[in-house]
Amino acid sequence: MNDYMVLKRMIDEAHNIVFFGGAGTSTESGIKDYRSKDGLYSMKLLYPPEYMLSHEMFMLHPKEFYDFYRLAFNCLSAKPNVLHHFLLSLEECGKLKGIITQNVDGLHQKAGSKNVLELHGSIYDNYCEKCGKYYEGDLIFKNTDIPKCVCGGIIKPSVVLYGEALDANVLDEAVKLISDCDLLIVAGSSLTVEPSCSLVLLCKGKLVILNKSKTTFDSMANLVIHDSLGNIVRGLKCEN
């Protein structure tokens, strides 16, 4: 039995699946990942990309921060791909109990998935730092300067920047989901960003890792497939 058939059997036999996804889940929607050879972090920048997307950069150099932020995250027109739709089918047949994503693009929700935990926030939610007024993503990406609120304050995306803590409530929910699942599918993530990657260690059920390249967690997994996520999920169907 090849690895793809093994994966199908594991999904068919599971009752409480949790999906943990990284940037690789969105590449087939035309969104660049971070650490591949053609990813965002391969770009030549004034500062290292982690600093360009840091809280300190936002505070000290907001114009330069937003110039790179718009370049990195302007994916409002992106559409869900085959993986997002496959996960929706797993949710609809009762197998998938939750999605934990490191992405900020909102594609899981666009596909129709309901129980989605966004560890790193969303480009769609933005707030004035001064008065707290909410703004949608369109305002940020259509602007060419520092986006300002009607009160004069700077608008900040809810995306978790380097140097900022994850939302404690979201993290707690993610811990519970992974601790209770009988199958954890980790996909499209290099599993190098803390504390998100350490969540994998909480899995008491079976662990599957799907990624184009190797991760440091591969030796822990019950199944590892190195291929594009589109190739892996095409043809898979949810069966009760």
Image (cartoon, rainbow, N blue to C red):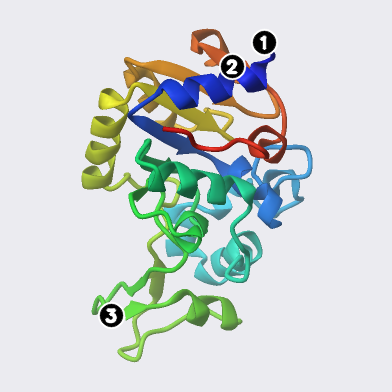
Secondary structure state at the residue bearing disc 2: helix
- Three-letter amino acid code at the position of disc 1: Met
Q: Which residue is denoted by mark 1 in the rendering?
A: 1
Q: Residue at x 42, y 21 (%)?
A: 13
Q: Which residue is denoted by mark 2 in the rendering?
A: 6
Q: Position of residue 168 (x, y in %)?
A: 23, 43
Secondary structure state at the residue bearing disc 3: loop
Q: Residue at x 59, y 58 (%)?
A: 80
Crowd band around label 1 with a 10 angstrom C-alpha radius: few (<14), some (14–19), many (20+): few
Q: Position of residue 26 (x, y in %)?
A: 61, 49
Looking at this rendering, what residue extends furthest in the bottom direction?
Answer: 150
Upstream in sequence: badge 2 or badge 3: 2
Of residue 230 and residue 157, the one placed in the foreground of this image is 230
Crowd band around label 3 with a 10 angstrom C-alpha radius: few (<14), some (14–19), many (20+): some
Instruction: Report the Cα–Cα distance between label 2 and label 1.
Output: 7 Å
Of residue 106 and residue 234, the one placed in the foreground of this image is 234
Residue 102 seen in this snapshot: no
Q: Which residue is denoted by mark 3 in the rendering?
A: 133
- Three-letter amino acid code at the position of disc 2: Val
